[in-house]
Amino acid sequence: MASTIIDVAKKCGYSKATVSRAYTEPDCVSEKAKRKIYAAAKSLNYTPNAIARAMVRQRTENIAFIIHEKQSPAILNPFYSPILEAVMRESARRNYSVFVMTNQDVQLPNGEVYIKKQMDGVIFVGEASPEVIGRLREQKIPVVLLNNVLDMEGLLCITTSHYEGAVSAVEHLYERGHRRIGLLAGRFSPQVNEARYQGYFDTLARRGLEANPRYILEIEPTLEAGEEAMSRLLKLEERPTAVFCTNDTVAAGAMKAVIRAGLRIPKDMAVVGFDDSSVSRVVEPELTTVRIDMDQMGRLAAEKLFDLIEGNPSAETRIEIPTELIVRRSS
Amino acid sequence: MASTIIDVAKKCGYSKATVSRAYTEPDCVSEKAKRKIYAAAKSLNYTPNAIARAMVRQRTENIAFIIHEKQSPAILNPFYSPILEAVMRESARRNYSVFVMTNQDVQLPNGEVYIKKQMDGVIFVGEASPEVIGRLREQKIPVVLLNNVLDMEGLLCITTSHYEGAVSAVEHLYERGHRRIGLLAGRFSPQVNEARYQGYFDTLARRGLEANPRYILEIEPTLEAGEEAMSRLLKLEERPTAVFCTNDTVAAGAMKAVIRAGLRIPKDMAVVGFDDSSVSRVVEPELTTVRIDMDQMGRLAAEKLFDLIEGNPSAETRIEIPTELIVRRSS
DNA sequence: CACCGAAATGAGAACGTTCTCAACAGGAGG
DNA sequence: CCTCCTGTTGAGAACGTTCTCATTTCGGTG
């Protein structure tokens, strides 16, 4: 029912080629023609059909933002939202649209890879299957991996300095005089876990402190798990005086346990988080945390993806965005 | 470069029509043919081209989820995330993909409406321009409006019972013995504001309480604004003993001000929020709030939209999802 | 006024599917 | 053995653009 370029062409007396040009390369069309064409288009309520355009151009100007389903209870947790937001902003600037998908949208129940839609590029964030990525790249679809590292020829991975971030957090606690420092480690991807874990360990070691295995709990990265873990720490006969949590949500849960136990933060227990997600400012006292610049991550991922789409492969295959310790009142 | 249906047809010796059928209506193709076709497809790495399919079918199996840019500082705030999640889940079930967009993606800087992409349907959430909706519907694209009401012929609007929710919140505070009840009203769309506002007023009136204008503050719906507003309330010589906040984020901000002032929640100041967003469980004590079933909202919006797309218009034009008061420890 | 080059326009193939319609194969029934 | 019906298959148009190449128009120059 919608009017097509041919209707417009008929109405204004030009050929469809010229009408097409009026939209895609207006400089090559005379003023007179443009006036007539736009007028005709307006009266016919014409909008160029993106599908037909994509068909011939072999380019949809769509990208996909793919999150792994198991990433978190809520698909769009406070961590990924700002990243998606940055990706959307950057995409809008470049006239791209973005699909938000789960790994499931790209993988059949039987495990087979199946890419439903044509897209010019894909950003995976967090966990991602090498098989899916491989399949995508076989089809010459550019891929950028965010917040994760996979060893694939020429695959651009953007991460943050998890290790250095953890070091700065623990160092900070040490400097504030803490000697019994716990670790609530959320379960993320192996890379992330190991790096943050190692940062904690190395810092203790460098400061001549012994890591107390009873102070170290590996848990799901949820509010509830953080709360539960902290209550366990609080029950120890010699409890830690500070904990480093590997994300803000866990830290918020930990704070709740402390407050419920009638203890003071940071006097009785200092808490440091990781991410600087929106959660860190919701809690009272506000959370000291290791800031990840999610806006930059998202923007960079989008930029690099667009470069790839436009055929400008970047030489670099790893980008590590520095973290920054944000000291607030919880420590 | 990617292989097409013709390559597969050549390789397996069947016509492209039969190959096409093997994917779209497998029941009409013999077992032998299917075996050969799938084998050929696999060896050629063939995937049906969604663009070409959309071209002839006049159907993309894409929908758009459009949020107004000014809705909040973060595009994907804790309120909209669960809704989007539900929409995505429902879409996946029906084999649709979802674009996440801003109003800007659909509106030129000069205010003109411009729908970049072909989509089978659109869900607007929150603020939405009647002009854009009108334009979409002119083009026979089904639209569902979420969390807002617009008076347009046959437009399906899904909202929650803001009024009843507000009543239940204030009623609850009254029953707990509060007589000086403040209102921190975030600025949302007129409908929402008015309904929640009115619920507050009517309840006070019904209970024979006088609304004290000094207890009523209209503010931006942000954490900071909530905090700032509460500190103002705390400075009053006769301060309220409870506040009803028209969203959880504002409530969280208010709680922070209370705690900072060294007062106790709920003993010195009870706080009730609205939404039951993720924030309500992050704060300590956990927030009493009016629950909106966002999962149901999202699911319903998607379901109704798919019905419309499939040509089954629903008779109803307004759906109001009931709220539920969730009593936690902040009141 | 003829000529030239540049700018503007037009004709028509191509993009990769689906779908309609027709043709064909093969088995059942007379 | 012929006819009819059903289940499979194939040919080719159609979907709405863009893009290449050829043609026309036009303004300026000698």
Image (cartoon, coloured by chain):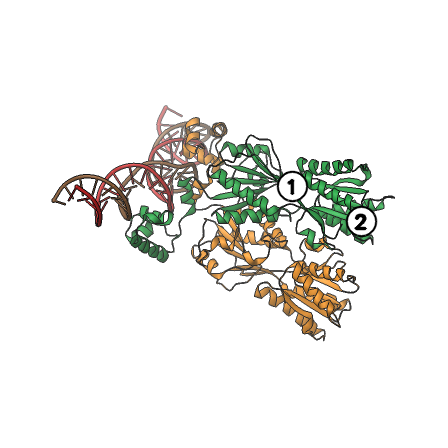
Chain colours: A orange, B green, C red, D brown
Q: Indicate which disc residue B330 carries.
A: none
**Badge 1: how crowded within 10 Å, few (<14), some, or many (20+)?**
few
Crowd band around label 2 with a 10 angstrom C-alpha radius: few (<14), some (14–19), many (20+) = many
| Label 2, label 1: how far apart the Cα atoms are | 31 Å
Which mark is nearer the camera, 2 or 1? 2
Q: Residue visible at 43% across and 54% down?
A: A139
Instruction: Determine whether, in the image, residue B15 is placed left or right of residue A261.
Output: left
Q: Is residue B320 visible?
A: yes
**Residue at position x 75%, y 46% in the image:** B226
Q: Nearer the viewer, residue B72 or A91?
A: B72
Considering the numbered disc 1 on the image, is that residue within a helix, a strand or a loop? Answer: helix
Tell me what residue is drawn at x 49 percent, y 27 percent.
Answer: A43
Residue B84 in picture, x, y percent from top left: 58, 47
Q: Horizontally, is A309 left or right of B273 in the view?
A: left
Up the image or down, A271 lies above or below A114; here it is: below
Q: B244 or A11, which lies in front?
A: B244
Q: What is the three-letter code of the residue carrying label 2?
A: Met
Chain for numbered disc 2: B
Per the image, label 2 sits on a secondary structure element best described as loop
The amino acid pointed to by label 1 is Lys
Q: Which residue is located at x 38 percent, y 53 percent? A: B46
Q: Quadrant of residue A189?
A: bottom right
Q: Could you tell which of marks 2 and 1 lies nearer the N-terminus? A: 1
Which is nearer the eye, A280 or B318? B318
Q: Quadrant of residue A233?
A: bottom right
Q: Which residue is mark 2?
A: B269
Nearer to us in this view, D1 or A103: D1
Label 1: chain? B
| Residue that numbered label 1 is attached to | B70
